Every structure is written in structure tokens, then in C-alpha cells.
Image: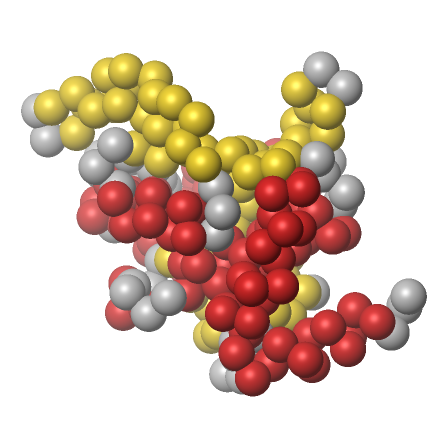
Amino acid sequence: MFEFGNIRFRSVEREDLKLLHEWENDSELMMFSRSKPMNFASMAQLEKQYEEWIKDEKTHRFIVELMPQREPIGIARIELQEWGNIRAADLGTYIGNKEMWGRGLGRTITVALLEISFNQLNMERCDAWSVEFNERAHKVLELCGFRKGGAIRQTVLVNGRKWDSFHFDILRDEYLSRRDDLLKETLGPKYTQYLEQLQVVQ
């Protein structure tokens, strides 16, 4: 488990599939997280996916919980990749509990993913993708230091219109140069406590 401010990451367990089934069958949620509002998943499909996740050593999948009540609010993913001989991570997340939208949790989750990727997994770069109409996600990524690298045109059809997919990335040095400010902004009063926890094993 990984605690970061008011959230905690833990592994996805089989008993989480019921909740994932609810989230993955919400058309509004799927429109913004998958860019496919009609991407519904049966429990049987999720169970099959879960068995594949267990065998997948290149992807870390987490349930994101709100502390201290440990309420599941979303999921997050770090997929390990390589660009030539450069260690990279593709990041993804969504907040499944829509009552939590607009509270700044997306930024906290994203910074937590960057902390894991750069400070624990020793990645050299992180990438993220977002559909053209998801301006809220673009803002979160840019606030966390990602740069928009480009677009792949007309990759998604939603509500009768074709949309582009935007690519964002951030390099290790770029993150480290603004890490302290990001940690202070997202952790607030828990900033010092978090750094003290990291010092324990140094």
C-alpha cells in the first residue's frame, strides 16, 4: 500500500470487482475515462480481466481509497514500457465516485502516480493520453507538469463526432525540478510527514 496525503493506493482484489462493475457500466464515467460511453463490461468479462491482471507483471493496478475512512473512490494504473532503452511509464486513472469529482483529487492521484513512477520505480519519463473533449483531465496533467506532445487525429467517435487523442508527457528531470512545489500544493499540512516517511529508509 502507498499512502499519499488523504488517499491510499492498494492492490485490486477480487472483491473489488462488484464495485468496478458498477463504475465500468456508467456511460458518463466511461465517456471520460475510456472515451467510449457504450463500453459496458459484464461481471464475467471483469473476472476474466482480473485473471489476466494477476499474470501481468508490467502493469501495476490500484484501487484508490480516500483516507481515513478507506472509501474506494477510483482506480489508477502504471504500465511499464520502454522507448528504446529508456524506462517509461504510461499512467492512467479515473475517479469512479462521481461525488468526488471537482475536489482536486485527480491532481493528488496524478502526483502520487508520479511519485511512485519516479521515486520508487526509477522511470525516466511518464506518458498519459486523454481524449480531446476531456479538458478537465488536460488541466490536471498540465498542473502536474505534463506537456502536451501532440495529437492523433480522429481516433474516437463519441456522440456522432470524431475526436482527437492528445498525448502528454513529463521527463524525470522536469518532475524533480518542480516536485517540492507539487508536494506542498497537494499534501498541504501532510507535506512534512510524507518527507519524513521517505527519510526512514535513506
197 vs 161, nearest the viewer? 197
x 70%, y 35%: residue: 124
**Left or right position of 20 against 123:** left
Q: Quadrant of residue 134?
A: top left
* Outermost residue toward the front in this view: 177
Looking at the picture, how far across and down is residue 40, in whole percent? 29, 39
Q: Report whether residue 44 is seen.
A: yes
Residue appearing at x 63%, y 51% in the figure = 177
Q: Quadrant of the N terminus?
A: bottom right
Residue 9: tell me if it is visible. no
* 68 with respect to 1 (left or right): left
The relative height of residue 10 versus residue 122 in the rendered view (above or below) is: below
17 vs 26, nearest the viewer: 26
Residue 129 lies left or right of residue 176; in this view the side is left
Name which residue lies at 26% across and 23% down: 164
Q: Residue furthest left?
A: 160
- Pick the quarter of the image with the C terminus: bottom right
Whole-percent x, y for residue 5 in the image: 57, 74
User: Which colour assignment does the render follow?
Assistant: secondary structure
Residue drawn 77% across and 75% down?
A: 197
- The spot of residue 74 in percent (x, y) is 44, 59
Q: Position of residue 54 (x, y in %)?
A: 67, 41
Vertical placement of 81 versus 92: above or below? Answer: above
Q: Quadrant of residue 103?
A: bottom left
User: Which residue is at the far right?
Assistant: 202
Q: Nearer the viewer, residue 108 or 28?
A: 108
**Total marks in image:** 0
